Image: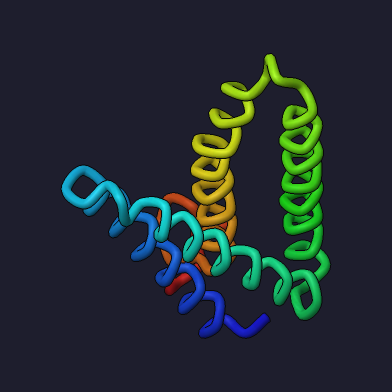
Amino acid sequence: MHIALKKIDSWGQILLIVGTAIIAPFIPFLVLSAYIIIGAWQLISSLIYLVAGSAKERAHRKNYWLSIFIYTLVCFACFNFKDLVFFTIYLLWFVPAFFALWYGYLTVKEANIWPLTRLNPQDKV
């Protein structure tokens, strides 16, 4: 995928995630909206990489999609058991934050925009 698109994708995710973390303590009701926006951004991004990305990018996205699929199955399975309602709420609230950070890290690493995540330390930005 074109490096300019990777950088736009990476910086967009960084701004959304950091912005949410900053705003959350002051305007908590916006967190749910931010979850939806970040999740939608990342799912669309992942689909684009899955279709148009290199083999290495597709491999990373396949792991991401497999994790999302398993997470979805676990959530649906938990809905069937009344005793697991609180566990399901926990899954629905906290696990997506992990996915957002994981996927954000993947895109930043592939775009080589952060020195600590560069695939090759000799790469120039």
- Image quarter in which the N terminus is found: bottom right
How many numbered circles are shown? 0
Which corner quadrant of the image does residue 6 belong to? bottom right
Left or right of 60 in this view: 45: left
In the foreground, 120 or 32 = 32
In the foreground, 12 or 59 = 12
Left or right of 123 in this view: 88: right
Q: Is residue 86 above or below residue 65?
A: above
At a point 16% along the width and 48% down the height, the residue shown is: 26
Q: In this view, does 21 lie above or below 14?
A: above
Q: Position of residue 106 (x, y in %)?
A: 59, 55
Q: Where is residue 18 in the image (x, y as percent from the top left)?
A: 31, 55
- Image quarter in which the C terminus is found: bottom left
Q: Is residue 27 above or below residue 44?
A: above
Left or right of 83 in this view: 42: left
Left or right of 44 in this view: 122: left
Q: Is residue 99 above or below residue 59?
A: above
Which corner quadrant of the image does residue 87 belong to? top right
At a point 70% along the width and 20% down the height, the residue shown is: 82
At a point 73% along the width and 71% down the height, the residue shown is: 47
At a point 74% along the width and 58% down the height, the residue shown is: 61
Q: Position of residue 67 (x, y in %)?
A: 75, 43
The residue lying furthest to the front in this view is 82
Q: Where is residue 103 in the image (x, y as percent from the top left)?
A: 58, 54
